[in-house]
Amino acid sequence: MAQIIPYMQIRGGSSKGVYFNRDDLPSDIQQRDQLLLDIIGRDSRQIDGLGGGHPLTSKVGVISPSNHPNADVDYLFIQIVVGENRIDATPNCGNILAGVGAFALESKIVEITEDTTKIRVHMVNSGNLCELILQTPNGQIQYSGDSQIDGVPGTAAPVICNYLNIAGSVCGSLLPTGKVIDEIEGIPVTCIDNGMPVVVIRAENLGKTGYESCDELSSDQHFRATLEKIRINAGAIMNLGKVKEKVIPKMSIIAPPINGGTISTRTFIPHTCHSAIGVLGAVSVATACILPGSVADGIAKVVKSNPQKISVEHPSGEFSVELVLDSEGNVQKAGLLRTARLLSKGNIYI
């Protein structure tokens, strides 16, 4: 007889994930992970599961009421590693986080209060907090609206995401190597973690313009081999250990902006070129842009202010990040706009 588990599928930002109430999954972690592989799909096509055969559509959010004194819900992110029959629960995912509020309201974990509902999310992967602000007029969550984010067609209701004190969320410090610039494989890099461990590299130092298409970069085997060597070595000095089978650190190659933004990026997650850029990856890159002496210093077009507004250009548009700084110039809060939409809800049959 088939095992039946309730789920929701939600587009969060420019990703798509399958969301569960923690109580509907096994408490044993190994059993849970094997079940999730069955649900999303174990092979590269994920033909027998709900995954889409791509890292952006092979994601899971596990949600539950929180015991954290300053949070409403707990959110555990799990990446199904496409084609490798394994999961990675190391990183956060800001896009899937954008859908956590929808799941919490749809499943009645959190009750709607006013025309906007604030939900404080405890990110279990890192221990950090994020405040989500959702549109809930007349006691109903609203999905339609006029907000548009690049990488997603059409418009939807805004979801405001305010990340609180996320520096060093995975690596332990904003600059996990203790340096603004390190040299790996003879190439200067900035290793940074403001919510997501990212290795930032100037495209020109890799023999690229930084404006290539994702297909062009992903199909360049020599380039990808060089990038992977840098990634593996960076993981060791970023307090991440052996990262060959991890999806972090993410790799972001940068170039001067060409569409009026602050910086142009091509980001890898970690081997496939992202059609846009991840939420927390964008926050880390944006932070590198305002960091004196980083590899972004001199090519990022930064206008100093507080809050500091950074426009991160990517292959399908741009991603705006607002950084609130303290008196010493440290980032206290990162605010950004996402959208989310409930795609389906029901039962999965295993």
Image (cartoon, grey):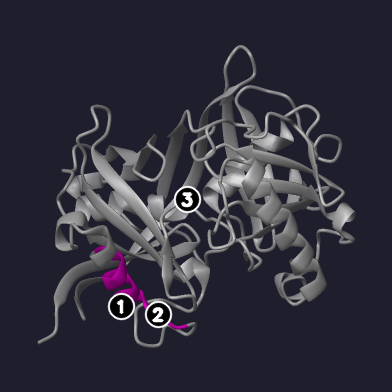
Residue matched to label 3: 91
The percent position of residue 185, horizontal first and vertical second, equals: 83, 52
Residue matched to label 2: 42
**Nearer to the camera, 149 or 76:** 76
- Give the left or right position of residue 261, taking residue 22 as reference: right
Residue matched to label 1: 38
Q: Amino acid at mark 3?
A: Pro
Point out the stretch of residues depicted in magenta.
32-43
Could you tell me how far apart the alpha carbons at marks 3 and 2 are, in whole angstroms?
20 Å
**Nearer to the camera, 183 or 342:** 183
Overall secondary structure of the magenta stretch?
helix
Quadrant of the frame with the C terminus = bottom left
Q: Are marks 3 and 2 in contact (CB under 8 Å)?
A: no
- Give the left or right position of residue 277, taking residue 21 as reference: right
Q: Quadrant of residue 128?
A: top left
Q: Residues within 10 Å of mark 3 (few under 14, many from 20)?
A: many
Is 260 part of what is drawn in magenta?
Answer: no
Which of disc 3 and disc 1 is earlier in sequence?
1
Quadrant of the frame with the N terminus = bottom left
Which label belongs to residue 96?
A: none
The percent position of residue 214, horizontal first and vertical second, equals: 71, 70
The percent position of residue 175, horizontal first and vertical second, equals: 64, 32
Is 297 rendered above or below residue 257?
above
Is 274 rendered above or below residue 51?
above
Could you tell me how far apart the alpha carbons at marks 1 and 3 are, in whole angstroms?
21 Å
**Nearer to the camera, 74 or 177:** 177
The percent position of residue 45, horizontal first and vertical second, equals: 47, 85
Q: Using the rendered image of the protein, determine whether residue 141 is visible from the camera's viewpoint.
A: no
**Nearer to the camera, 136 or 99:** 99
